């Protein structure tokens, strides 16, 4: 997919400056930067939720998204949430739930699930949509470290076999090191890409602490 | 069964405590009311001004046996149902449209405020004057009285719709019908039920006024007729008869409907 953004404004305020993005299928890109810099705005543009911008966007295809909040229908079970949102058949929905290790909780309502489990249902929903582009928007935020680590590990396994354009919006470099092939740092106002770092190894065979240090240095250098 | 009877007797939104304690309080409360009424009738000593409960019950029974009560109740109920459906349909559409579209709301809001503050009697009289003393005028007048209130309640519901769920539905390209049924309606259902309940409670009272002023059948007409004949017993018999019917509808239709609209909350927590 390709994004050639000239600018994005809200009224008179320019939020995003010129941003060029080209992402291959099977590539996982982590988009990081300080809070409020415009990461979610950029993701709303890529997901098609915000079509009002100056520039061009091509090759996104069908989008599966995991929002910052799980955004499930509280009046429907986990399985129904997937079936209703994606329109997939039941076997695919159950397979997606099994992928996130929630196959046995398919009948549970969101209020009966923990936040981590709700996020996994949201991930299963995004996977069941059979997306061309997968977006995880702060999908590991507000989770305790053990749950976040488990979710990252689960996601890494899923992404390893996937062939989507994947975006991970995060302000934790740990998420990027564990999951991404490439890290983009969004900074300044209006926001632009200030750093573009490509890992030399794939996430599952990566020495995480060394890579984290290298990534920090690279991103600081811009 | 006792719990249901208790709900019926209480006919209020007081949270249920102990079923038997609540039931006994309800029964005692009703008995106290009847005792006070009987005591007042005994004190007044004038059956034409304040007949005792047993006299009113006898009149009710006679009217029921003659078929008069059923005839007038059916006429009133038909108007209540017609006005209710009309008011809920138009009021809900208007409310959702104003809640979802700020620009339309800017246009519609002043109208809503005017109609909300227009006395029911004025609307009824104007409808009879402009449309004539017809069934259409009667039902229109009642519906017009309730549409603004229902619209305002539904507008709040539409404003409270979760934008994140809208985003979710848009991202996953849910079809409009599916989005309406599975995303929007469940969020609106409690507001719809509340608007329905509040609308129903007021509509039947306005229907009596409409009948009083310009119809030749119905409970309101009977009250008008017996008012002219100074038949207080008949007025009370018809009034209590209709109150009983409305409470039964409230208990059998409106309350279960309201409960079902939020059933997923209980299921989500306990199931």
Image: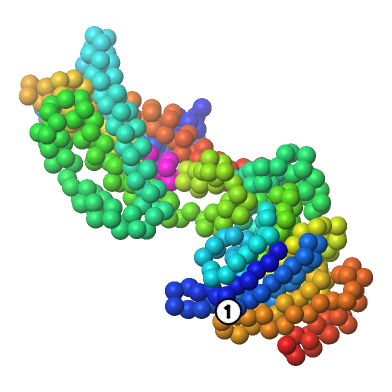
Residue closest to the far bottom: A221
- Please tell me which residue is depicted at 77% across the width and 43% down the height of the picture: A92
Magenta stretch: helix, strand or loop mostly: helix
Q: Quadrant of residue A146?
A: bottom right
Whether residue A179 is visible to the viewer of this picture, yes or no, is yes
Which corner quadrant holds the C terminus of chain B? top right
The answer to whether residue B38 of the structure is visible from this angle is no
In the rendered image, which residue does mark 1 sit on? A17
* Total labels drawn: 1
Residue B150 position, x and y percent, is 33, 44
> Is B109 in front, or is B266?
B109
User: Which is more toward the observer, B44 or A17?
Assistant: A17
Q: Residue at x 29, y 19 (%)?
A: B74
Q: Residue at x 18, y 27 (%)?
A: B211
Mark 1 Cα shell of 10 Å, populated few (<14), some (14-19), many (≥20): some
The chain carrying label 1 is A
Magenta part of the protein: which range? B190-197
Q: In front: A148, or B29?
A: A148
In the rendered image, residue A8 lying in the magenta stretch gets the answer no
Q: Is residue A11 above or below residue B60?
A: below
Horizontally, is B189 left or right of A207 in the view? left
Residue B209 locus on image (x, y percent): 18, 33
Residue B191, magenta (yes or no): yes
Secondary structure at badge 1 equals loop
Q: Residue furthest top?
A: B66
Tell me where residue A17 appears, x and y as whole percent. Answer: 58, 79
The percent position of residue B146, horizontal first and vertical second, equals 28, 41
Q: Residue at x 74, y 72 (%)?
A: A30
> Up-down: is B126 above or below B234?
below
């Amino acid at each position: 997919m390709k994004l050639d953004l000239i600018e994005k404004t809200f009224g008179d305020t320019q939020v995003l400056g010129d941003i060029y993005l080209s992402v291959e299928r099977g590539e996982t890109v982590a988009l990081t930067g300080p809070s409020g810099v415009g990461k979610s705005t950029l993701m709303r543009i890529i997901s098609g939720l915000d079509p009002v911008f100056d520039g061009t966007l091509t090759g996104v295809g069908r989008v599966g998204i995991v929002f910052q909040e799980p955004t499930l229908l509280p009046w429907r079970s986990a399985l129904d949430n997937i079936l209703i949102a994606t329109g997939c058949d039941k076997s695919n929905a159950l397979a997606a739930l099994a992928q996130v290790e929630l196959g046995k909780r398919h009948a549970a309502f969101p209020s009966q699930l923990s936040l981590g489990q709700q996020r996994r249902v949201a991930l299963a929903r995004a996977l069941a949509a059979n997306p061309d582009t997968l977006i995880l928007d702060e999908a590991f935020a507000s989770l305790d470290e053990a749950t976040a680590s488990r979710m990252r590990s689960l996601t890494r396994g899923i992404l390893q076999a996937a062939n989507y354009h994947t975006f991970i919006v995060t302000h934790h470099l740990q998420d990027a090191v564990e999951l991404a092939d490439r890290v983009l740092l969004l900074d300044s106002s209006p926001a632009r890409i200030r750093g573009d770092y490509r890992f030399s190894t794939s996430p599952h065979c990566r020495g995480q602490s060394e890579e984290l240090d290298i990534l920090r240095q690279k991103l600081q250098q811009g | 069964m006792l719990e249901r009877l208790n709900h019926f007797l209480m006919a209020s939104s007081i949270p249920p405590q102990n079923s038997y304690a609540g039931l006994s309080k309800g029964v005692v409360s009703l008995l106290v009311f009847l005792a006070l009424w009987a005591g007042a009738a005994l004190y007044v000593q004038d059956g034409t001004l304040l007949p005792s409960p047993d006299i009113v019950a006898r009149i009710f029974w006679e009217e029921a046996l003659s078929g008069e009560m059923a005839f007038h109740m059916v006429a009133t109920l038909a108007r209540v149902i017609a006005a209710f459906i009309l008011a809920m349909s138009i009021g809900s559409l208007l409310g959702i449209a104003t809640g979802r579209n700020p620009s339309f709301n800017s246009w519609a809001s002043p109208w809503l405020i005017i109609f909300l503050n227009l006395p029911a009697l004025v609307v009824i009289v104007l409808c009879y004057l402009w449309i004539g003393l017809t069934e259409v005028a009667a039902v229109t007048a009642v519906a017009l009285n309730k549409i603004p209130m229902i619209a305002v309640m539904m507008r709040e519901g539409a404003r409270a719709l979760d934008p994140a769920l809208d985003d979710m539905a848009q991202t996953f390209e849910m079809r409009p019908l599916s989005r309406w049924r599975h995303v929007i309606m469940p969020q609106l259902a409690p507001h719809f039920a509340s608007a329905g309940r509040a609308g129903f409670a007021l509509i039947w009272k306005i229907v009596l006024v409409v009948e009083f002023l310009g119809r030749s059948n119905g409970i309101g007409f009977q009250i008008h007729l017996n008012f002219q004949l100074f038949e207080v017993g008949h007025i009370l018999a018809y009034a209590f008869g209709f109150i009983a019917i409305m409470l039964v509808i409230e208990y059998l239709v409106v309350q279960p409907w309201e409960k079902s609209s939020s059933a997923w909350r209980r299921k989500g927590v306990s199931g």
